[in-house]
Amino acid sequence: MVKSCFKNPFAKAISQSYRSLLTKSIKRIVNTTSTGVDVEIHGWVKSVRMQKNDSFAEINDGSSSRGIQAILTKEQAKEYDFTDQQNRELQADQVEILGKCDAATYPLQKKHHSFDFLREISHLRPRSNTFSALARVRNGAITGFETFFQQNEFLHVHTPILTASDCEGGSKVFKISTDCSTSQQQEYFDRPVYLTVSGQLHAEIMASSLSRVYTFGPVFRAEESVTSKHLAEFWMHEAEIAFITKLDDLLEFTEECIRATTTHVLENLSTDIDFFKKWIDKSLETRLESLNKAQFIRMPYAEAIDVLSNSKQEFDFTPKYGTTLKSEHEKFLANEHCRAPVFITDYPKSIKPFYMRVNNDGETVACFDLLVPKIGELVGGSLREERYEQLESQMIENGLCLEEYQWYLDLRKYGSVPHGGFGIGFDRYLQFVTGIDNIRDVVAFPRAVGQCRF
């Protein structure tokens, strides 16, 4: 057995303090500490219920949806109000108030608050039960995705936020400019630069050496859509896989990724998921449980258009071959027609980005969108065009400057291999597992057109 030896007393003090901090969360105390043991907790007093001789304070530090109840003297609790009781409690020997709260003006009163109202106080809404539960689910979902990719021998790589390329081709991008003086603006870089819309192209660079890579980070779209599923800034999990030759293999891997992550969330955050089942979406339990039971359906784009055209559903936008599927079309296919997650594959190349591999018919590309009930599109992916001449031709068709993208062509020139990948809209995934309708309510500080206050 090897024992640690601290030659630096200061380092020893830091280590002891750090270790002590790690063992103080209310979640850990409730789950591991025996009764009759002295403990110290730090947290926020959610509320206090006053009785004749004693008072009961609900204290929570954010580590769990369930806080802990402390029995206080009337003097200790005189500045607070009502709380609910809990099945495990502390007998308080000493209470120190670190920061007072003006109960009369505090916006988060003990009553129901609408999401619209909470969005107006984004600096305070993490203190609400809904958003503290959401933060834990968000953290758990990140861990679920990370665990899945690591178990499948993917390397986590970082792709740049500032980029000179528009991966999606035609996306509305945020252009970067620098005010170098009081009288004029000029480019800081030697060319136009934008906030990234995707890390895919750079992930392809890394995969051409490392085989399997993934990235997780913010991406930006300057779209003016004011809908329940659009943001100007959102987060994406993106994966890139070398030596993959069949679209079916990519579909199977994507399905496994979503199932494994959702299982992780359900197993490790059951208390928080139960909160969303009870208060946010009564159908959530059925939808999440069916995810691991239902078969992910596969449907070519042409068949999807036929299904939509022959349905008795009235759409605001008429489904037509050669046009993109609208949100109402996606939800109909997942919610009504399939009643399960569905992969829509093989879109016309005219409505998809230049990098997707052209199928043998010369008209469609080997790609997919995964549509899930309630949300619509959750994942998008494709095999990438690894053939130099074909990729060059598609770039010309899409009006791209070959000189600007020569580095991307070089990946095909110097040792190209078949490869493919996908991107998962992480915030939309959170909508799926929590039942929250508006994407602006699963992000702590949402950025959308006209919205960048906090």
Image (spheres, rainbow, N blue to C red):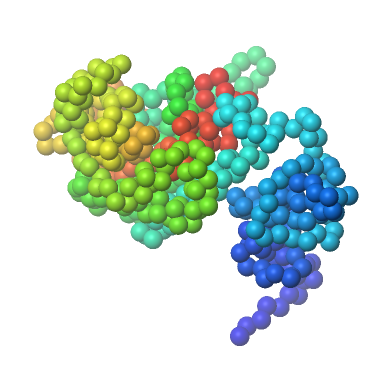
Q: Is residue 86 visible?
A: yes
- Residue 73 shown left or right of residue 31 in the figure: right
The residue lying at 52 percent from left, 30 percent from top is 440
Nearest the eye: 191 or 54 = 54
Q: Residue at x 74, y 43 (%)?
A: 82
- Can you say whether 287 is above or below 13 in the image? above
Residue at x 46%, y 38% (from the top left corner): 281
Count of residue discs: 0
Q: Residue at x 78, y 35 (%)?
A: 103
User: Where is the C terminus found, in terms of image quarters?
Assistant: top right
Using the image, determine if residue 18 lies above or below residue 439. below
Q: Position of residue 143 (x, y in %)?
A: 48, 53
Name the residue furthest bottom.
1
**Quarter-wise, where is residue 10 in the image?**
bottom right
Asked if residue 445 lies left or right of residue 363, the reply is right
Pick the residue in front: 221 or 358: 221
Which residue is situated farthest in the top direction here? 183
* Position of residue 341 in the picture relative to residue 235 (left or right): left
Query: Quarter holding the N terminus?
Result: bottom right
Q: Position of residue 317 (x, y in %)?
A: 28, 17
On the rendered structure, is 174 left or right of 63? left
**Please, which residue is most extreme toward the left here?**
361
Against 113, residue 21 (above or below) is: below
Residue 406: x and y in percent read 32, 34
Q: Is residue 407 visible?
A: no
Residue 15 coordinates in the image, percent (x, y) = 72, 67
Q: Observer-nearest residue: 304 or 403? A: 304
226 or 218, which lies in front?
A: 226
